[in-house]
Structures are given as structure tokens and as C-alpha cells.
Image (cartoon, rainbow, N blue to C red):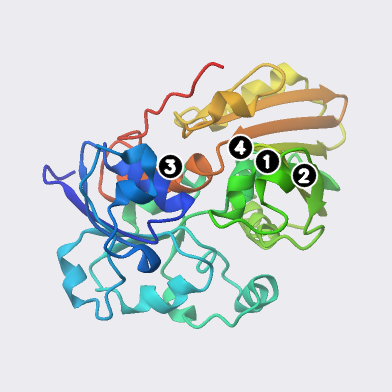
Amino acid sequence: MTDKMIRVGIFGGSGYGGSELLRILLFHPHAEVSLVTANEHAGKAVSEVHRNLLGLTDLRFVAAPEEFESLGELDCVFLALPHGQALEIAPRLPSGLKIVDLSGDFRLRDAAEFKEHYGREHTATVLQREFVYGLTELNREEIKRARLVSNPGCFATATLLGLAPLAAACALKGRVVVDAKTGSSGSGAKPAANTHHPQRSNSFYAYKPFTHQHVPEIEQTLGDVSAGREWTNELVFMTHSLPVSRGIFASIYAEVGEGSQLTADELTALYADFYRDSFFVRLVKGSPDINWVKTTNFCDIGFAARGRQVAVFSAIDNLVKGAAGQAVQNMNLMFGLDERAGLLLVGGNP
């Protein structure tokens, strides 16, 4: 750990992910935001776009630089950009700079799967091999040694934290069903026909059935967790739109092997051991609630069981543990800090 402040740059600071990075990093005890880009808002005060930061920062948005040599003065860059843009930017950044990418550009190791699910060719496959998958609780030691980290997707975070202990114990048999629901902020800051508040506020619907881009990411990581074996269980993954602003709730249904019946208490013990060093995973009795995790970096997990059938429920804030908070958690590890630094964020009640 170093005593000097970590000089941070944020590419894509005007969206919800960028807003949350600023909300967290402006008060981080070991980080200083030196650069924040937003081409369409270049020249504007950050607090003019993010009104929640009024009076808390004098930073102004700037256009992304055309040449990146000057960024060598930074220590760490967060890429909070739409899918596809990090592919162009990351290879051009100075080689000593640490990078946390919040998009899906460097999560998948298979270029063919990337093309299938993101609709474009992967143009930085050599660099992709250097990226470490940044699900902190599963890859903590690798992240500590990494220069390049690919932050997980929000649905993938909620699902993998809910499934990883069972996968690591090789307890899952047969089909796994994930029924996941998200708030509207997961669609970004710009309204679209199906995310605009009047459309969504009293609505509920499924989207991207069987085709969500987080599916290969989840299957890839479950294979890594399962003692490095290929994930062979059938995964049914369905996503739904919730009429709330933020939060993800995943209901995970699975079956364990013959003679492996688990009670809810036994599930709790299994998960408590797996996450014994993970401050941001909290185990709750019964069902968690997205209200308990909103604006925080926590993932709350609860259980139910009946014979060989188990249900695992996980809840996160999609913008914090599902994006910016986990990105900062990873930055902390990359720089030898306590991973909780700047992230002791408490939710509200109610």
C-alpha cells in the first residue's frame, strides 16, 4: 500500500455508472479524481449534470483526449462507456496505467461468443487475455496482482454470488433456473421507449429470453469456480423489468445431488464458510430485499430448501455492487488497500 493518493480518471462520467463512481471516489480516503470525460457535456460543471453532487466538487467534464500520452500522469482509469468503446480505448492507454472496464468488452474469453452476444467483432483479443475477471469475492488474489480488470455485469454479479458456493462444492445437479429482475437504471441514463418512466412505472415484463449477454459470462465463471471444469448444467436465465429505479433481485432454483439434501440452515453454513472473508456479502434469514441494499455495495443472500430442491435469493444495487462499487472494490485491491475503503455506504430505512 502506498501513502500517496491514487490519481483517477473516469471515461464516461455523465451516465449512471459514472455518476456513482464520482459519488464514491470523491469521498474515497486514498483516491483523487483528476479527469472525468463526457464529450456531450464537455466544459460543464459535474454538478450541473449530477445535481446530487452540487457543492461537493469543482470538477468539470472534458472531452476525451485524442492522444493518451498525457494520461501517464494518472494511476488508474475507469472505463464507464457503452459496450464497444473500451475495445478502441484500452489498447491505446499508457502501458503502466491500471484499468477497470465496466463494460462487457473484456469479460468473455471466447471471441466467437463475444460476437454472438455483443454483435461486433472483438478487436483486442491479445489484450483481452491480460484482463482479470473482476468478481471480487471469487477472484480476490488475481485482482490484487492485476493491471487490467474487467468488471462483471450486474445480473452476473447477483447470479454468480448466489450460485458460486454450490458450484464450488460440486453440489448442483441438472437444470439451474435463474429468474432475475432489475430496476430501470440498468438501461442507462437516456430514456428509451421501454425504459421511459411513464411506460415502466406501472409495468412488468420479461426481456431478452434465453439471449441475455450475461449468460456466457455466468457460464464461463461457473466453470472456473467448479474446480476449473467446464460448466455442463443447463442454465435457464430469464430477465425481467421491475418498476423501480435501482436494484436487482435474483431467484435461483436448483437441485442438489442424491443424498445431498440441504436445509436452509445447512445452506447458510455452506455460504458462511465460502464467504467468511467477504465483508460485502451478507446472509439473511428468508428473503433479502432490494431496499436493504440500495445505494450500498452489499449483496444480501437468503435461502429456502425442500429436500433436494434449493432456492437462493440474492439482492444487489445494480449501480453499486453491480457496477461502480465493485469497480472501486477492485481498484482498492489493485493498489493494496483494504477493499472496503470508500465503500462503507449505508442504505436508508425505509
Give me the C-alpha separation between circle 2 and circle 3. 23 Å
- The secondary element bearing badge 1 is classed as helix
Read off the residue under disc 4: 247
Q: Cα distance, mark 1 to mark 4?
A: 18 Å
Amino acid type indicated by mark 4: Gly
Indicate the quadrant where residue 224 lies: bottom right
The residue beneath circle 1 is 163
Instruction: Please give the residue where the numbered disc 3 appears in the rendered image.
Output: 325
Kindly indicate whether the residue at mark 2 contacts the one at mark 1 (C-beta within 8 angstroms). Answer: yes
- Residue 243 - label: none
Vertical arrangement, residue 226 with respect to residue 214, above or below: above
In primary-sequence order, the first of circles 2 and 3 is 2
Q: CA distance from mark 1 to mark 3?
A: 21 Å
Q: Whole-Å distance between the Cαs marked 2 and 4?
A: 16 Å
Q: CA–CA distance between discs 1 and 2?
A: 10 Å
- Contact flag, marks 3 and 4 (Cβ < 8 Å): no
Residue toward you, 313 or 145: 313
Kindly identify the amino acid type of the residue bearing the numbered disc 1. Answer: Leu
Q: Amino acid at mark 2?
A: Val
Mark in the foreground, 1 or 3? 3
Q: CA distance from mark 3 to mark 4?
A: 13 Å
Residue type at mark 3 is Gly
Label 2 vs label 4, nearer the camera: 4
Say whether residue 38 is left or right of residue 210. Answer: left
